[in-house]
Amino acid sequence: MTTLSIPVTPFRGDADLPAQADVVVIGGGIVGVTTALELAERGISVVLCEKGVIAGEQSSRNWGWTRQMGRDERELPLCMHSVEMWSQMNARIGRETGWRRTGICYLSYNQRDLRGWQAWEQIGRRHGLDARMLSAAEIADKLPGQNGGMLGVLHTASDGRAEPWIAVPAMAEAARDKGAAIVTGCAVRAVETSAGRISGVVTERGAVRCQTVVVAGGIWSRLFLCNMGLDFPQLKLIGPVACVDGVEGLTDMPVGAGDFAYRKRLDGGFTVAVRNKNLAPLTPDHFRLLTEFLPTFLTSWRELSLRVNGSFVQDLLRRRSWQPDQTTPFEAVRVMDPAPYPGFARQALRNLTRAFPGFAKAKLRREWAGVMDATPDAIPVISPVHTVPGLHVASGFSGHGFGIGPGAGQLMADLITGDPTRVDPKVFDISRLRPAYGAQH
């Protein structure tokens, strides 16, 4: 049994691997699970294969925010649709996900942040979102326990929060109720094609015949597609997080500022983090993809902390190609479970205490870290690979996957079945990053 640094709700995978299905989904994070749920609800036979445990990686390690506010405008329609889906999720699956419509606040303590959130307020208005700057009286009402000094607060009442380690396994149970087969501890080794299109997959436990494959492998998607001869531009970022107890008198809504973030949990504690400070351990892929990621780095360098550690050698030595009958890197690392980063919890609490003195009494309960999959423009790919009929990719969510997971799974299911999409799929098409894999005209 795998012991993780984060207590994910246990999920028992199916004992048997089906011999065939319409669709095979690779990856048991929120996007793979919601894709399987959507397909099963439409009567499509689907097998989800997860190399480790359901929601073992970033899908259970994120902050649990389900927000629209502050998103890239291109991504905003999907975010808004996803929040609406979150509001119906408990009733839809008949299980608790921890989702509550609490609203979210972003606090500005300097002119740079204030101008940024004032500008984003206009973006929200263009899309009919209820994001707005609060008055001084509203700030005092909505943010009890704060120490003052804020220049402004952007608030979105329709945003919310959920419990990642509860929600994703609950959705997986619901997908199985609808007929999906969900097999854990089962890495997909290779995709098979016949006459130029998908015909099946080979797993460590046998083969599955299918017509469609969805690669929703999170940080592992690039490596899996590399074995197929496809160059998917994606890098890894690490986000340290902690949970604390002993804090009272604060709002139930998630709150973020330039250097801190907190969220009230269902269990009464708080998930806390240092906002805008993700770790970026250098790997060989940073050099392979330097040209594509350099513009993003130059505009967001304040949010990254570059590190040189053992990840470079590990990635350099990791096999990048293999045969279907060979053991793969996915079997060697069932769950990517990075150790907590020393000092980050203390830094988060120092930053928080400066603004909300109640955190001075906080007791650290648990620390963990998660690894996020990022694309050069921080927008996910939710798309067919047009040069390989039947192959689809849903990856590169850049830390946004939990919040937009329901909409992403629905969009992927729509693309597979040919149903009308709720948002413009061109925004997420792989052709924007890899024109060679785009639709052929």
Image (spheres, helix red, strand yellow):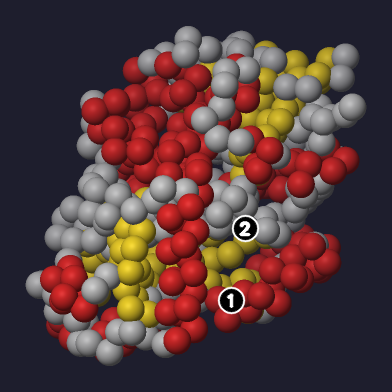
Residue 31, numbered circle: none
Dot 2 or dot 1: first in sequence order is 1
Q: Position of residue 224 (x, y in %)?
A: 71, 42
Q: Amino acid at mark 1?
A: Leu
Residue drawn 18% across the image and 61% down it: 252
Position of 132 relative to 342 (above/below): above
Residue at which label 2 appears: 378
Q: In the rendered image, which quarter contains the C terminus?
A: top right
Q: CA distance from mark 2 to mark 1?
A: 13 Å
Q: Position of residue 392 (x, y in %)?
A: 68, 31
- Compared across the picture, whether 323 is left or right of 302 comes to right
Along the viewing direction, whichever of 170 and 411 lies nearer the viewer: 411
Label 2 or label 1, whichever lies nearer to me, is 2
Q: Give the crowd class for mark 1: few <14, some 14-19, many >=20 residues within 10 Å.
A: some
Tags 2 and 1 touching, CB below 8 Å: no
- Compared across the picture, whether 181 is left or right of 350 comes to right
Q: Position of residue 263 (x, y in %)?
A: 27, 63
Residue drawn 62% across the image and 21% down it: 416
Position of 16 relative to 335 (above/below): above
Q: Could you say which quadrant of the image residue 138 lies in?
A: bottom left
Q: Position of residue 257 (x, y in %)?
A: 37, 76
Secondary structure type for disc 2: loop
Q: Give the crowd class for mark 2: few <14, some 14-19, many >=20 residues within 10 Å.
A: some
- Compared across the picture, whether 196 is left or right of 41 comes to right
Q: Amino acid at mark 2?
A: Ala
Q: Could you say which quadrant of the image residue 254 lies in?
A: bottom left
Along the viewing direction, whichever of 329 and 46 lies nearer the viewer: 46
Q: Is residue 6 visible?
A: no
Q: In the rendered image, which quarter contains the N terminus?
A: top left
Residue 304, numbered circle: 1
Secondary structure type for disc 1: strand
Q: Could you say which quadrant of the image residue 265 lies in?
A: bottom left
